[in-house]
Amino acid sequence: MSTRKLSVLDPTGYPPKVVARGLSQSPGNLDGRTLFLVDVGFENSDRFMVQLQGWLAEHRPRIRTEVVRWKDQHAPDPELCARIRAEGDAAILGVGT
Amino acid sequence: MELEVDYGVPAVAVQADAFARLVDSVARVNGMPHARRCFVPTPVIDRTPDQLRAYIEGDDPVRGGPFMARVLSLLEEPLPQEALRGVDLDRSAPRLVPPGTEDELRRLFEDNHWTDYLPIVLPTEERVEAMLAGTSRAPDEIVGQMRPTSYRELWSYDVEKVAVNAVMAGALPEHFPVILALASSGHTARQSSTSSAAGMVVVNGPIRHELNMNMGIGALGPYNRANAAIGRAFGLLSQNLQGGSVPGETYMGAQGNAMAYSSVTFAENEENSPWVPYHVQQGFDPEESTVTPFYVWGNTWNEGVRDTWPQKLKRMVTAQDPYLGVTLLMDPIAARRFVDVGFGTKDALIEWIYENCRVPRAEFWDNFGSRNLYHTIVELGEEPFTSYWNAGPEELIPVAEPDNIHVVVVGGSSNGQWSLFSARHVDRRFRNSPDDPATVSIEPWR
């Protein structure tokens, strides 16, 4: 096999610039606060969230929970996001499959 | 992520563990590698309530430790400063890779997942320059944007980047306008879907003859340079220009798809078809050359349009999941037989399939595509799927809407073969823009 060095081009595309995006600080202890359980719409996510709500009711009864459903599993649901911001303190979303 | 970043709500994403590397990758390229996430075992889809409860009471299979303890600690404990800031990421790469011997470069390309693991033509500057002679477009002109799935970021590419991948695939400069047209569509041949979709490509118009494409005997097989190289180029350019197609990270097909090697690329046999060409159905002039990319999953085969064809066709169509699409590839012999039994146009056959190939409501909704992709449309209140959702359990529902049924004539008449490919246009919801056409003209890329 040849030992001659070749010069070849990189075949990959141009990625978008990745700009840092910060997370929101934790609210602290969730007792007495509202936690939204967001079913993102993938099959069986609704059942999962009901089970999650049941676990929280048993083990952390002072956390208020509400199960809600994301309309489109492939895109954010602005109406629901705005409601969660107005009425909630944190959220659990799932289940991604 | 939108809930966290755009609305300021601390949020934990729960994911199935098969997607762990993918989720890590998406978090990183969104500038938030510390995004709160927890994992449960795969699968979730077919689990009972008790099994799901066991997931919740069990351990996180990726991060370790009790699942719920991790969820709650992510929401209740203070985050480090780095998580609150996020992390910039520079992924720019030089135009040339470091020089190397042929062996070294082949290994580099494989190690970086830049090939389909068959030997490639190394894209030297001379070869890329020769490929660029196949178009009038400038090397630095942006061709389009692509991504492996709708929730990942769009990567862009210019004419030279497409040429690099065309060289790697073994394409000739005269093939390049077709390859550029495919790249301009923004549709990927390396969709990351767990369903293992591959690409399929139909070429129409005069360019079929200019490139000596195969539309006769063996058109879908490995018997023609243009068919083979254009299809392979579509696959390679997709994986490399969209930011990768790496199993577990940017590709999640459970079994994969052998059709992805060739992207099932062929020309329609317009001259021997009794019907209008496919691109004319899509609104193009017969003299305009076009290319249409499809997603494809699999196929079934028939020889001859025999007396019991209605029963056979109904079984073929109703056997597949509704979302996938119905694409009939007909040898000219079979196409003429369908004319004989009453279908003077492709549209008449499409209408027959729509009217006659139906399944009960319960069956229509009991599959992955309907439950996960059509049901979203129901959530948005759109028809006809909202009515299909509200139908009685025994009400019959069409397996495919007319715009998800396609007929293409291809074959060399060695028998009356006709095949049903589970293939469809890219869903409008997953195009870069919903208005992007399914069929694109090759002419602007000459």
Image (tube, coloured by chain):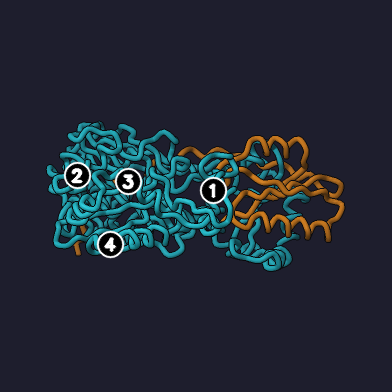
Chain colours: A orange, B cyan
Percent across and percent down for residue B35 are: 63, 48
- Residue mark closest to the camera, 1 vs 3: 1
Q: CA distance from mark 1 to mark 3?
A: 28 Å
User: On the image, numbered disc 2 is attached to which residue?
Assistant: B175
Q: Which mark is residue B293?
A: 3
Q: Residue at x 61, y 62 (%)?
A: B44
Q: Residue at x 32, y 57 (%)?
A: B420
Does residue B23 show up? yes
Q: Are marks 2 and 1 on the same chain?
A: yes
- Residue mark closest to the camera, 4 vs 1: 1
Q: Are marks 4 and 3 in contact (CB under 8 Å)?
A: no
Q: Are marks 1 and 3 in contact (CB under 8 Å)?
A: no
Which chain does tag 1 point to?
A: B
The C terminus of chain A, quarter of image: bottom right
Left or right relative to B296: residue B138: left
User: On the image, numbered disc 4 is attached to which residue?
Assistant: B118
Q: Which mark is residue B388?
A: 1
Percent across and percent down for residue A22 are: 64, 40
Does residue B238 show up? no
- Residue mark closest to the camera, 3 vs 2: 3
